[in-house]
Amino acid sequence: MLFVLFMAGIMYVSAQDIFYPKNNKFRQMGTAFSTPNAYRAASGAPGQLYWQQEANYQINIRLDDEQQKIFGEEEIEYINHSPDPLNYLWVQLDQNIRQKGNLALRSTPLRLDERYSSYMMARYMKEFDGGFNIDYVTDEEGNDLPVTVNYTMMRVDLPQTLEPGEKTQLKIKWWYNINDRMKDGGGRSGMEYFPEDDNYLYTIAQFFPRMAVYNEVEGWQNMQFTGRSEFALPFGDYELEITVPADHVVGATGVLLNADEVLSEGQYKRYKKAHESTDRLVVIVTEDEALKSEKGKSKEFRTWKFKAENVRDFAFASSRKFIWDGMAVKFGERMVLATSLYPKEGNPLWEQYSTRVVAHTLEVYSRFTFDYPYPVAYSVHTDRIGMEYPMMAFNGGRPQKDGSYSERAKWGMIGVIIHEVGHNYFPMIVNSDERQWTWMDEGLNSFLQGIAEREWDHMHPHPRGKPSSIVDYMKGDKTGIAPIMTNGNLIVQFNSNAYGKPAVGLNILRETVMGRELFDFAFKEYAQRWMFKHPSPEDFFRTMEDASAVDLDWFWRGWFYTTDHVDISLDAVTEYTYSSGNPADDKALRKQESLNEPEELAVQRNRETIKSMVESNPSMRDFYDTYDPNEATEDDRKAYNSYLSTLSPEQKATLASGEYFYQLDFSNLGGLVMPLVIEFTFEDGENRVERVPAEVWSRNNLETSKVFRFEKKVEQVSLDPYLETADCDMGNNLWPPRIEQNRFDLFKSSSSRRGSSSNPMQDK
């Protein structure tokens, strides 16, 4: 008989394969998402009645370089675009995280061990006299307003209700001591002291009382700042005057309004030239000029004036140590200044890479989202972790004093610049709530960082979003793992959860699930829909589906809402061929199979010790002792020829084709369903990759099978051959299985892997 396979690859489904809809991983997210409304549409776009608040600032700042203090006065214009009357406003006082007895320290668990890190000593054993000192909070006429300070949040009670469409004015005066970011565990902002030349480098942020976000999702976002989950801020326009020592160079959010007043004639000419130079770097403040300022230490003061439109925050950097370079990046008819500020201690790394990496980042990110809308993008050198603000990025990466550096230092610097400058897009423009959903800016930004890193150098050793990079985390102890959809303050393994896993997930969506064309269009649609607005997670999820026609609910549920991991096992590979129906062929095959079948062990041992009855007495033999059922008879041949006469020429050709069919059986051990990426290696050495969509698991989330037809024999089958699905156990992904090879290390040499921390440059 002819063995028939369904040529269309229809899956056989038994009763046990059917899952109840309430348990199926492909059921729609439905009730897990918030209900669409007039403010946020079901498509993921802003609704027809979408609104957001507005806060405009005029701020005067004085930087005291002798006592390391900030003194400030501000006027806030707050406009109520909501449909709600407001009786009070919430203002963020993020510097209060450094107050004595602050909530962050009081609520952090702590154990005393034999080894106590310098970070822990600095943070817990030496209290810094930080935090805002508020001199006054008044209305526009100077009348004191009642305020209540609750750690890092301040409620301002209004004398009368702020009705929809109305605006109010606040005036606040304050000062605070600037923290040493080198001693407080790498604070997001602060100062660094250079004892060799007795100078300071200031990277200043969260330096003024800032309005909190009020929206229809959270109401007031007045969750306390405890140092991890970052910020939620409304958009507005800023005008700042920053008074510093006359020999300081200042970079800040926005356009420098009085460059001709604060720069020398030569510096001003170079400053203007940098705005036009797209092909080469222009040094605005030279290293010689910076060295001269380091030694001079002017006692006079100078005021730098900046203006920024439609930004959610403001930051600045100031030092007499700064070297300043820049170049232009063109977007249509508009020029954007990519620029860097760094001390001599940053060279040679910074003069070679920083500004060029800034320009590269703007070009790559803009291609995947929208043209960078701001006039400038700064990269400012620090010796600790990076941090981001509109148009301003504080970035680490410092070579050794002899100018040498490890490959890890180089790639680390390039990576942190891409990442922090990239934050201009997420969340500075696509303004998600960092306090609530860390992954919405860190994860999306890390994903684009990986794209920019790969486009910077194909040989980048550790680009963000590489699927294999998240395997150890995902297969780890689940008691220390939380779903991505968890508030950042509650996460134990913060970096893997908020940065790594979302970035890998988006990379898998782009490269494996959706394909680049569909993903890139949908991702750009999300970015453009929500630029200068406040998106929620559902807005992202819905837009990605709305713009691609790809049902991704199974992916959001598994990757973002659970702690399941990917472990798909290739359990069995069964080979089938057409049976010709020829009795001679069939019986010859059965005869060979019987000859290959091993003889029972008891019979083998009996042959060695005794004679059987029929051996001892041949008369016990009869017809069946010589009859071979696996020999074709004349009747068999006649029946087969009669059968052939009934077949069409096409059917006869099919019998003679010699095609092979392979049934592959899979099981889902980790819980996360994924597409099946299968590489077949044939006897002649050819490789062929077949891609099966994740929906193959939709009728049975635990087991599935797939049949493939080939014209030649398969020698090997490999599941996920390019490590693109973050499969946590590659030991069950190969057929036939093979012994895994490893080696004992008798001598541990210094690491020579790409991106290592060794410094062969110094050795030479």
Image (tube, rainbow, N blue to C red):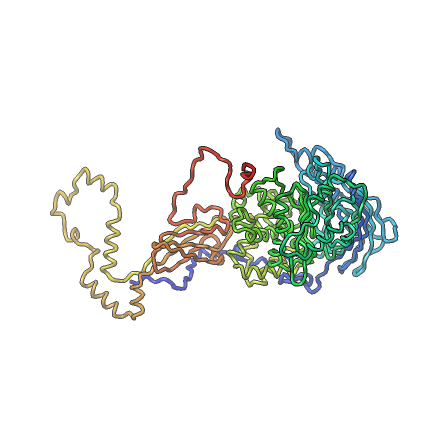
**Above or below: residue 669 compared with residue 98:** below
Q: State the image coordinates of residue 404 (x, y, percent, origin top left).
A: 59, 39
- Vertical comparison of 367 with 102: above or below: below
- Residue found at x 21% / y 62%: 636
Q: How many marks?
A: 0
Quadrant of image for the C terminus: top right
- Judge from the rendering whether residue 138 lies leftward or rightward of residue 380; answer left or right: right
Q: Is residue 551 left or right of residue 166?
A: left
Q: Nearer the viewer, residue 339 or 100?
A: 339
Q: Is residue 388 visible?
A: no
Q: Is residue 169 left or right of residue 26?
A: right
User: In the picture, which quadrant includes the N terminus?
Assistant: bottom left
Can residue 43 be seen by looking at this rendering? yes
- Along the viewing direction, whichever of 198 and 719 lies nearer the viewer: 198
Question: In terms of depth relative to the viewer, which is nearer, 132 or 337?
Answer: 337
- Residue 689 in the image, given as x and y percentages of width and height: 43, 56
Q: Residue furthest top?
A: 114
At 76% from the left and 52% from the top, the residue drawn is 259
Res 197 → quadrant? top right
In the rendered view, does 298 fall on the left or right side of 217? right
Q: Position of residue 169 (x, y in %)?
A: 83, 54
Task: Give coordinates of residue 211: x percent, y percent.
Answer: 76, 51
| Quadrant of the rendered image containing residue 124 | top right
Q: Nearer the viewer, residue 597 or 252?
A: 252
What residue do we see at 43% from left, 47% from top? 732
